Each structure stands twice: as C-alpha cells, then as structure tokens.
Image (spheres, helix red, strand yellow):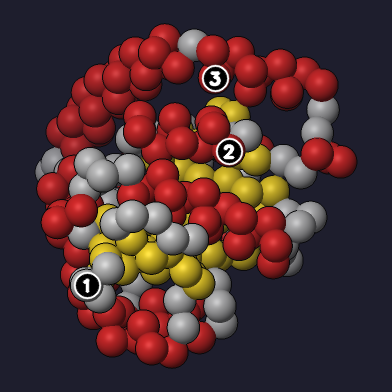
Amino acid sequence: MINKQFVIQVAQEEHLKYADTIVEEMANSAQARGTGIAKRSPEYIMQKMREGKAVIALSKTGEWAGFCYIEAWGHEKFVANSGLIVSPNFRKSGLAREIKHAIFKLSRKKYPNAKIFGLTTGAAVMKINSELGYYPVSYSDLTDDEQFWKGCQSCVNYAILTSKNRQNCLCTAMLYVPKDQRQPNKQRLRKDFYGNLNLFERWTKIKKSILVKFNKALKLDLQP
C-alpha cells in the first residue's frame, strides 16, 4: 500500500534490522499508557517477518514508521493482529488506521476461515476495528488457547483478569467473524455498536474506573 507519506508492505528480510527498534517502542508505548503487552523479543519479531506474517510502514526517506504482526491461535481457528505500534515521529497521521487495514487484509488472505479478534483499551483502535467489521464480545467468545492468555501475564492489570476468571478486564474484546459463520443477532450488535461509538466509549471509561478501583482494593487485600 502506498500513499503520499508512507510505504506500507508485508515485512521481508530487508526489514529485520528494524526489529530492535520495534520491540523498544512497543515497551515504551505500553509504559506510557500504563498498561501491559505480551512482551516479544527482537528474534520473535524477526520470525514473523520471515514468515510473511507482519506489516511494516516506512517513510519515503526509509525511516521506520509503524508495524503490526499476525498470531494464530486454537489450531488457526482464531487470529489476532498484535503489536500495533506507530513511531512517535508519525503519530496522529492516520498511519495506525492504514496499518490495521493492511494487516487485516493479510490475515484474511492467510487465514480466510479464522475469526479475527483483539483486546484493546484504546477508543481509536475500537473505532478502526469497527470499520473493519469487528464488534464487541465477551471474553468467552475468544480463543481458549492457554498460550494466548499467558501473554497477558506481563500486563499490570493481570490480577484483574485472573480474579475475574478471564471473563473481564480493562481491555475490550472485539471480534471479526467471516461472513459464512455469522449469526444475525451478532450482526445487529455490530451495527448497533458502530452507530453508538460515543456511547460505547463512555461505557468503556466507566468500566475502566470500576476495574481500576477493584484492582487497588485487590492489592490492599493481598498485602501482608
């Protein structure tokens, strides 16, 4: 994908040199947001590039601008578009949306029968997901693959997730279902969500406020 500012493409061998920068920026971004992500090593990011399961964005001058990769779970029944990150130099440029669209297209090509899901606390990402056909779901609608949930252990809110038996947390779960697997009632939910995004954002803020208070109380209870 090419626009006036960026070249967005499937990552290749020539992009391996950006792996350290990508991992470092992922960690910095998570720390700034006060949330956690599944920690990945540069070697893991390189592996995704070699497998053709990552999208990278570069500026016209060759500067790294953004990245996202694909992970498959539950015997490829579920796919997650993970690690979306945009360089601080290029934020608020609309690049995140373009990367999300590119990685979604790549996911559909590689795994046409898989459901695509994501966990996010960001309203901007929720909006982009909605544009792509995702809708909010309960955690029970996501993969039960233990390896995926182990990735949440590095999140500062992991205690909330485990105390809720993996049924709720600060992140909102969103799901895309291929057309031939869709149920009419779920489709109505998606349309209702898209038409009331502002209402949903307010609900997310309320949810965050409640769960943050719960987390503080939980930490006090665990103190000796």
Residue 2, percent from left and from top: 44, 60
Task: Identify the residue at image location x=19%, y=37%.
Answer: 219
30 lies left or right of 176: left
Alpha carbon of mark 3 to alpha carbon of mark 2: how far? 10 Å
Quadrant assignment, res 162: top left
Alpha carbon of mark 1 to alpha carbon of mark 2: how far? 30 Å
Label 2 is placed on what type of residue?
Leu
Quadrant assignment, res 42: bottom left
State which tag comes first along the sequence, 3 or 2: 2
Q: Mark on residue 194?
A: 3
Q: Which residue is mark 2?
A: 132
Q: Which residue is mark 1?
A: 61
Task: Identify the residue at image location x=77%, y=18%.
Answer: 185
Q: Is residue 221 visible?
A: no
Task: Identify the residue at image location x=21%, y=59%.
Answer: 87
Using a 10 Å C-alpha cutoff, classify the residue at mark 1 as few (fewer than 14 neighbours), some (14 to 19) or many (20 or more).
few
